[in-house]
């Protein structure tokens, strides 16, 4: 068989440019209709919502927030910083005694859960943390325990409103640990297909999305939740779903109080192994202001995998070509 003559360089270049131009035009169409999720960085960033899978809480670095409707199912949240860019953020440590761990427990970025049955001491734990460090606690569809809480704590009528309030304060440079008390409303109100024991799986999906949108922006929130049933079969179905949805959880088991202070015991688990470890926390009745714990300012860096699904080679070529033309 006779060999085909090689195309001259000019022809190959012309064809290549034509292919790139066609790729760019097609890519712009795909990006505009949301077929390719190009992650954006802007003067604002987005958080997922508990109440809606169709909207984001969008917030500026000055803490001004509003609601942004998703343009398509592949409309990804706008983030605070570019991939690979360093930014400073606050990292919180709780002085839990866990085995031989001496330096306390570093709270992961994202939505971290404080759970336990009725009377286990979830709200008491949150109040005790305030003696140890500055906290920013909001009651969200959760009854106040006394007149002091009614007069001194912000009260919000949805978990999304509470989340927006907490993050608005956090991005404006505070050093308080955000605490959302509690996730009662999303647990009651999110609808969807029910699994065993009537558990709504959509609740856990929303919790994960909120947690990821916090974590990938270097933000930390503690949130309380009461399963509202101590039935063994229900907890056996509920707790694995909850614990697999968040970076870490604190399961409170007991609280005792003396004239010196309060002692909390329970179990703590954290990704990736999610192995439960017993912990103890003693909180004195009185803590000197100078002795209160402060967050550490750390460098936070994001990676591409934090935000994007893995794109195909052709999709990456399209995005690369677009970036050279805009």
Image: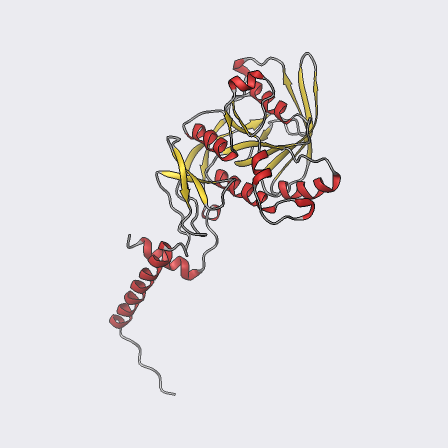
Query: For residue 58, what is the image quadrant?
Result: top left
In-image side of 43 versus 137 (left or right): left
Q: Residue furthest right?
A: 232
**Residue 120, position as x, y percentages in the image:** 68, 27
Q: Residue at x 54, y 19 (%)?
A: 150
Q: Residue furthest left?
A: 10
In-image side of 47 versus 180 (left or right): left
**Residue 196, position as x, y percentages in the image:** 69, 48
Q: Residue at x 54, y 43 (%)?
A: 206
In-image side of 78 versus 147 (left or right): left
Query: For residue 230, what is the image quadrant?
Result: top right
In this view, 192 is above or below 298:
below
Can residue 80 be spotted in the picture? no
**Residue 72, position as x, y percentages in the image:** 42, 52
* Coloring applied to the structure: secondary structure
Q: Which of the image's four quarters has the N terminus?
A: bottom left
């Amino acid at each position: 068989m006779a060999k085909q003559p090689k195309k001259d360089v000019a022809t190959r270049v012309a064809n290549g440019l034509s292919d790139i131009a066609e790729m760019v035009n097609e890519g712009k169409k795909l990006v505009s209709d949301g077929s390719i999720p190009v992650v954006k960085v802007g003067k604002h960033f987005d958080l997922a919502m508990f109440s809606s899978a169709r909207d984001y809480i969008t917030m500026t670095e000055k803490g001004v927030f509003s609601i942004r409707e998703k343009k398509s199912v592949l409309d990804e949240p706008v983030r605070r910083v570019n991939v690979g860019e360093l930014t400073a953020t606050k990292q919180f440590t709780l002085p839990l005694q866990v085995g031989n761990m001496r330096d306390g427990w570093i709270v992961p970025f994202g939505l971290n859960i404080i759970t336990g049955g009725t009377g286990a001491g979830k709200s008491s734990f949150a109040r005790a943390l305030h003696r140890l460090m500055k906290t920013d606690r909001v009651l969200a569809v959760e009854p106040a325990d006394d007149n002091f809480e009614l007069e001194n704590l912000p009260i919000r009528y949805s978990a999304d409103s509470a989340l927006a309030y907490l993050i608005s304060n956090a991005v404006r440079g505070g050093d308080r640990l955000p605490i959302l008390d509690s996730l009662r409303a999303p647990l009651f109100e999110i609808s969807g297909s029910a699994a065993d024991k009537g558990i709504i799986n959509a609740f856990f999906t929303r919790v994960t999305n909120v947690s990821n949108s916090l974590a990938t922006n270097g933000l930390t929130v503690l949130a309380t939740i009461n399963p509202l049933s101590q039935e063994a079969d229900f907890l056996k179905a509920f707790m694995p779903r909850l614990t697999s949805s968040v970076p870490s959880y604190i399961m409170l088991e007991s609280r005792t109080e003396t004239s010196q202070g309060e002692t909390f015991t329970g179990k703590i688990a954290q990704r990736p192994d999610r192995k439960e470890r017993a912990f103890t926390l003693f909180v004195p009745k009185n803590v000197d202001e100078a002795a209160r714990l402060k967050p550490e300012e750390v460098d936070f860096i994001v990676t591409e995998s934090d935000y994007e699904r893995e794109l195909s080679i052709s999709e990456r070529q399209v995005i690369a070509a677009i970036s050279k033309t805009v």
